[in-house]
Amino acid sequence: MELDKALEPTPEWYWMEMGGVGRKIVEEFFPIKPGENVVVTADTISDWRVVQETVKAIYAIGAIPTLIVHPTTEVATADPPEPVTAALQAADAWIEFNDSYLLYSNAWKKAMEAGVRCFTLGGDVDSLVRMVGRVDYAVLDNLANKLVELSNHATEMHITSTSGTDIRARVDPAGSEGHVLTGGEEGGINFVGTGSTQVPPGQSTFGHVADSVEGTLVFDGTIWPPTEIGVLREPVTLEISKGKIAKITGGQEARTFEKWLASWDDQGMYEIAHCTYGFNPGVKRCKGEIGHDERVFGCMEFGIGAAWADAPAHTDGIVLEPSVWADDVQLEAEGRYVHPELAELARQLGVAGY
C-alpha cells in the first residue's frame, strides 16, 4: 500500500468531520437501534481514529458497543481468532473495520447464518470523510440502482478501456453477485443464512453467467491482494476464457500476481467472481487501499476468486477509464457516464464536467 498523508496517526486529521461520519454511519447508512448489541472489529492496521468515533456514535444512540481488536490476518478472507468468531454470532449487528477484511471468511459465513447484520467498512479517516461524510446518499443510491437496472435488462455487457480491456459477459440478473452494493439497507451481499452484509457507498454489480466472460481484461489502477502490489506502476493483462484467467502478461507486478494466484493451488482462484461499477464522487484516484480504489468514480472493478463459494481467497483489480455497453446501449465512454439518466445523476452528485 502506498503511504498517504491521511494515514498518519494524528488525532487532529479531520477530527471534526469524523465525528459527523460516525453518526452518519450508525444513523443513515447502517441504522443501529437503541439496545442492540453491536460488535466492532478491528485489526492492528485499522485506523484507530475511525474505530473510536464509530464506537462513540454507537454508544451515544443507546446501543451497546463491544470492541474487539485482534492481530492482522496474513491474507484477506482468512479467519480471525476463534473467540472473535464466537462473539460475532452473538451480535445483533457487526461493523468491520479490519483492513485485512473478514468478509467471505468462515467467521463471516457463521455470522450470516446466525442472522447478523454486517457493515464491512475498512478505510482511514481521509477515505471515510470523502466516501461517506460528503456524499448525498439518496442520489448515490439512485445511481447504483439505475446501473443495475440498465445492466440487468441487457443480454450481454461489453467493456473496453483505454489500456486495452475488451471483454464480454452474458448477463444473469439472478446471479449470486447481482446486488446493489451501496451501503444502504436495501442492498448488500447475502449468500448464506439470514444475515446481510453492506459495503461502503459507491458500487453496484451486475450478475453474470460464470463461464461466459471472454476477452482481454487489463488492470491499470490497483490490484489487492497481494500486499506486494497495490497501486499499479504498469498494466497487468489477463486473457479470460470461459470465465477464468487463461494467461497473465505484463511486467514485474504481473509476475507477482501470477505467482500469488498459483500459490493457492486452487482453480477457483482463477475465476471471475464479479463485475462491478465504481462511482463514489469522493474517490478520484487510486491510493492503494482497495476499499477506496474500487470506488473511483467511473471505474470498473473485477473480483477474482469466489471466496464465498469455497475459493481459498479473493482479490480485486481496477480498470480505469472504461467504456461500457449494455447490448447496444452505451452507458459509459472512457470513464464518463453518457447515458442520459446516469449523466443527470452524476450532475446531481456534483461531479465535475457533468
Image: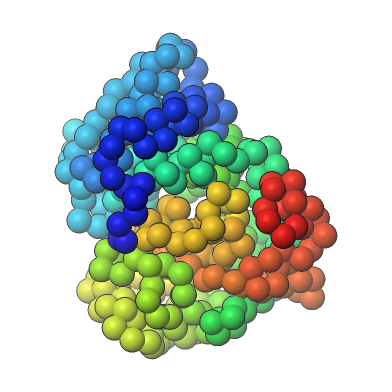
Which residue shows up at 82% across the image and 60% down it? 340
Quadrant of res 12: top left
275, 175: nearer the viewer: 275
Q: Is residue 231 left or right of residue 204?
A: left
175, 70: nearer the viewer: 70
Q: Is residue 189 left or right of residue 63?
A: right
Q: Tell me where residue 229 appears, x and y as whole percent.
A: 31, 69
Does residue 229 sit above or below 192 in this rendering?
below
319, 259: nearer the viewer: 319
Which residue shows up at 24% across the image and 31% down it? 68
Q: Tell me where residue 232 appears, x and y as whole percent.
A: 38, 73
Q: Is residue 202 left or right of residue 118?
A: right
Instruction: Please say whether residue 150 is visible from this viewpoint.
Output: yes
Which residue shows up at 52% across the image and 44% down it? 131
Which residue shows up at 37% across the image and 20% down it? 56
Q: Tell me where residue 297 appears, x and y as whole percent.
A: 59, 58
